[in-house]
Structures are given as structure tokens and as C-alpha cells.
Image: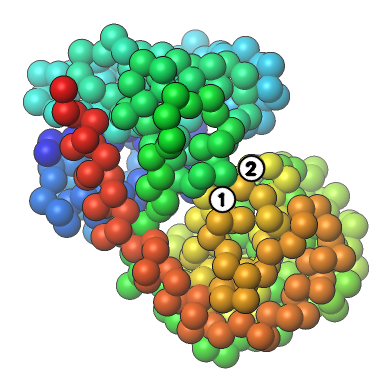
Amino acid sequence: MKLLVVATALGPLGSGRGGGVELTLAGLVAGLLQRGHRITVLAAQGSELPADCAAAELWSCGGSPQPSVQHQGREALITMPADALLARFWQRVLTEAPAAGFEAVLNLGYDWLPFWLTPTAPLPLFHLVSMGSVNAAMDAVIAEVAAWDQRRLAFHTAAQAADFALAHPPLLVGNGFDLSAYQFRAQPEVLLGWVGRVAPEKGLEDAAAAAARCGLPLAVWGLVEDEAYAAAVEASVPECTLQWRGFLPTAQLQAELGSCRALLNTPKWNEAYGNVVVEAMACGVPVVAYRRGGPGELVQPGVNGWLVAPDDVTALVEAVERVEQIDRSACRQWVERHASRAVLAERIEAWLEQGLQP
């Protein structure tokens, strides 16, 4: 197939502003290229595709990034800046994509506009929904697409899909990773890890509190979106509890992440999947996570980590004390079976082919 993949309008690929969607796009595009599909990626100006996606063509647009719906509240109105990157994305899709011969467009952005366009667009639009329910208007437009033709929607996990009013059981595709980019580490250091955008919905304060109570340092990797929040978390725990490592490309992240005794995953909201959970497991790192959202499906207690009740810091501490019971090689093996790029590409290909049937 000849496919157009539309990236998030939150910022350029490679900047980290797109969060887990950037990693999903890289895995999806590389996997589809390996299966012989012709791929074009539409992304913000300044974007860079990873080396294993070099065979894809890159279209880019300038414009103001879209404000994240995740940070605006359930009843927030749908808005766009005057010079909206999102509007330019979809103007280009509607005007150029049909003549370019694309058979379908695969949208990875969690934005109202492309969902609303789906029934009337001049070529088939498919959506890999990247988040759970965070906004009433988004809930409504996803439900409208599901009622019109739910074959145009796919989700990462059952927990994510359960947030929405769907006409039929959801299509679940999980996610896929280049496992050659993650090196297994059998022996950890005396260190805990936490990875994610540093913002209140990610719950870093709980991981910091647990690390402090365990008497262990916590390495924090990720883009600091909220400086005041980061400062408040640091002030809440003893000095030197937190090690701020910043946002790192995959190669550097995995090299450092693999040294952790465990990854703490403490979201305050319903994570659609949990990319960082799988990245840690790929390095052999057990995961201690809240039983919430996608990570609640990825972590198999006693096999690749432990699940605890959401928002229970005491339970986090107790689970950290049991991570030595986890076989680190079993963490890697779980990822190889369930979350490779090849597995994701096969699922995406089957979804698109089925959705294109009359």
C-alpha cells in the first residue's frame, strides 16, 4: 500500500514534545517499510526521521503547535492558534494526498479536526487513538466515527478503549519497538528509574516519595513541561533523591535505563499504553506500576514486574522491596513476544486492509 502517516501537531519529530506518539510513529513506519509498503510522513517543520525510517518520504509544514488537549480539562473548547500547524496538516492532506495516489491516511494525532473530517474526506482516514478520555468534545467525535464506521479506529489497549462509547468491540494493536535498540542488562545498579514528561498527570511525586522511603536514588528521564511542578517534587523529598537526566534519544536512554533495579510507573490518569514500561522491560528492568490504564495490562505480576493499587505510595515501596523476585530475562522475553515492530506492523497492515474493504 501507499500510505500517508500524519504525526502529532504538538511539535517536530525528534523534539520529545510529541511524547510516546513519536516512538509509536518510528516503530510503525519502520515496520511497515520492512513489509514493503510505501510510506510518506507528514510532520512539523524541523522534524527528523530516525535512520531506519529513511526510506519514507517526509512532508513538512510550518505553523504554531497545537495546544495539548490533555492539559485543558474535560469541558475545554476545541481551539486552534491563528497560524495553526494542525490546520495546515489537514489542508495539505485534503488538497494534495488524493492526487498523490495514497490509498489511505493514518492519523496518529489526538486532535478533534481529523476525526471530524473522517466521514467526508476524499480518501480513507484511519486513526490510531493515542490517549484515553481527557476531553468531552474528543469523546464525542470519536464516538461519532465509531458509529459511522468503527473500522477506521484502532486502540493500544482494552483499558484505553473502554473510555469511549464504541459501537463494537475495539480493535487493539498494542505497540511495537525496535528491540535491537535495547540492550539487556542482567545486573542492575542501586538505582530506581522513572521516565515520562514531567507534568502533574504523570505522578512523579509518588515515585519520588517511594524512592525516598526506600532510601534509593531515582533517575528521572524526560522533558520537563512544568518547571514549577518539577521544583515542587524535588522540594518534597530529601536532597539528592532525584537525579534529573533530561530527555534522551532512545539509544542514550536505554543505555542508562538498563542500569535500574526497577522502573516506577505512577500515572494519575488512564495511560493509553505505556511505552516506557515496555522500553524498561526490553532492557531487563522490572516495572512497578499502578494498576491503571495500559500499564495495568502490560505488567504481568511476578513475571515482568508488580502492579499496585493506584495512588498508594506504601504499596509502591513494598513492591520495590520484592523486585529481586523478578527474573530480568523474563522481562525481555515478554517484550520479544508481544511488542516487536514486526508484530505491530502485521496488526496495522491487517487493520488497514480490513478497513479498506467495501
Residue 292 position, x and y percent, is 67, 50
Q: In this view, does 45 lie above or below 200?
A: above
The answer to which of 296 and 238 lies nearer the viewer is 296
Residue 40 position, x and y percent, is 20, 37
Q: Which residue corresponds to the image point at 39% horizontal and 61% vertical from the top-left?
A: 339
As drawn, the residue found furthest toward the bottom would be 187
Give the side of residue 343 with respect to residue 312, left or right.
left
Is residue 287 visible in this depiction of the protein?
yes
Give the side of residue 291 with respect to residue 273, left or right.
right
Residue for badge 2: 270
The answer to which of 60 and 103 lies nearer the viewer is 103
Residue 82 position, x and y percent, is 49, 11
Q: Which amino acid does label 1 sit on?
A: Gly
How crowded pointer 2 is (Cα within 10 Å; few <14, some 14-19, many 20+) is rated as: many
Q: Which residue corresponds to the image point at 26% horizontal and 52% vertical from the top-left?
A: 345
Quick one: SS at disc 1? loop
Q: In this view, does 226 lie above or below 33?
A: above
Numbered tag placed on residue 108 in the rendering = none
- Tally of marks: 2
Image quadrant in which you'd find residue 47: top left
Task: Look at the image and tell me in which quarter the N terminus lies.
Answer: top left
Q: In this view, does 306 lie above or below 175?
A: below
Residue for badge 1: 294
How crowded pointer 1 is (Cα within 10 Å; few <14, some 14-19, many 20+) is rated as: many
Q: Which residue corresponds to the image point at 73% horizontal and 70% vertical from the top-left?
A: 218
Give the side of residue 326 with respect to residue 214, left or right.
left
Image quadrant in which you'd find residue 358: top left
Q: Which tag, 2 or 1, sits closer to the chain's start?
A: 2
Q: What residue type is labelled 2?
A: Asn
Task: Evaluate if marks 2 and 1 touch, with contact meaning CB atoms under 8 Å apart.
Answer: yes
